[in-house]
Amino acid sequence: MKELIDSKGLGYRELNGHIRKILGLSSSDSGNRYAGMEILLKNVCGQRYIGCGLKGDHKISIEGVPGNDLAAFMDGPIIEVFENGQDGIGNTMNSGKVIIHGDTGDIVGYSMRGGEIYIEGSAGFRCGIHMKAYKKKTPVIIIGGSAGDYLGEYMAGGIIILLSLRRKGVDKVFGTGTNRAGYHIGSGMHGGTIYIRGKVEEYKLGRDVIIDEPKGSDIDILYEYIGNYCNFFSADASSIKVEDFIKLIPFSHRPYKKLYTY
């Protein structure tokens, strides 16, 4: 069953109220009264908090550009955006999937503790900041293009994969090399893993990470999530070779212990 909402002229409170009404939820309820609902939002233009706190196996498709904090605190649904996204996507997200057919703004996956975010294009600054693994949950962010400065800042768990792909006539940044990450990668990182396609110059790294080679389970992880990315965005998997990736890990799980303990 698929429901349609025309978002043109609706404020974010009104739009989110319509979504919750379709799902059979009150203003304070985030549960799963109606299972497996599909909602298509047309003419979205900057409305915030879409999918915020929703649970269950619902799917929300978005035509237009949603505002900040898309899928914040979300726990289960799938949200697919057919244009760009803004800042704070997946803020403290617990589970589910967000699929962006375009670029995103800053702090994607802020404090994310589960679920998966797929970005076809590029992400802004501080993507994955404060990401953390929670019990058996492992959050994952896959970025197709470039990432701004401070990728994985203060990261405490989870996985970030940067594919460093280029789109003809669209991408113009980060010179001619294959690596398309910004500066201060993994600054303050004390958990989790960052995989980057292409050689990474040491001056781009935060002082808290070291470069390693993907092996064993790393290969399985890369194949799984690269395969998902290529399926979502009809990308050519044969052009993304696992052997072209480097792996960044923290050299310490307590990089700032001297600041707080003797």
Image (cartoon, grey):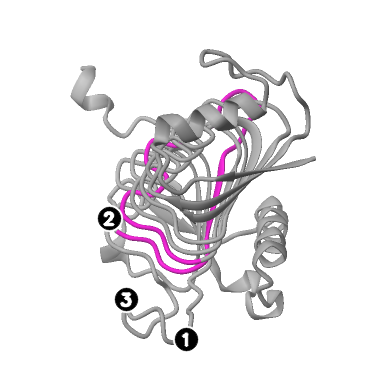
Name the residue carrying label 1: 168
Image position of 243 with respect to 2: above or below: below
Marks 2 and 1, the one that precedes in the sequence: 1
Count of marks, rendered view: 3
Front-most of 33 and 236?
Answer: 33
Q: Is the magenta stretch mostly helix, strand or loop?
A: loop
124 part of magenta stretch: yes
Q: Residue at x 61, y 23 (%)?
A: 135
Q: Is residue 229 left or right of residue 197?
A: right
Which residue type carries mark 1? Lys
Q: What stretch is highlighted in magenta?
A: 121-148
41 part of magenta stretch: no
Name the residue carrying label 2: 184
Element on which disc 2 rests = loop
Which residue type carries mark 3? Phe
Front-most of 66 and 182?
Answer: 66
Marks 3 and 1, the one that precedes in the sequence: 1
> What's the CA distance linking mark 2 and mark 1?
27 Å
User: Residue 174: which numbered mark, if any?
Assistant: 3
Q: Residue at x 73, y 18 (%)?
A: 33
Q: Residues within 10 Å of mark 1 (few under 14, many from 20)?
A: few
Q: In the image, residue 206 lies at what x, y percent?
A: 29, 52
Closer to viewer: mark 3 or mark 2 = 3
Marks 3 and 2, the one that precedes in the sequence: 3
Q: Is residue 249 left or right of residue 185?
A: right
Element on which disc 1 rests = loop
Q: In the image, residue 1 lies at what x, y percent?
A: 80, 40
Image position of 199 with respect to 97: above or below: below
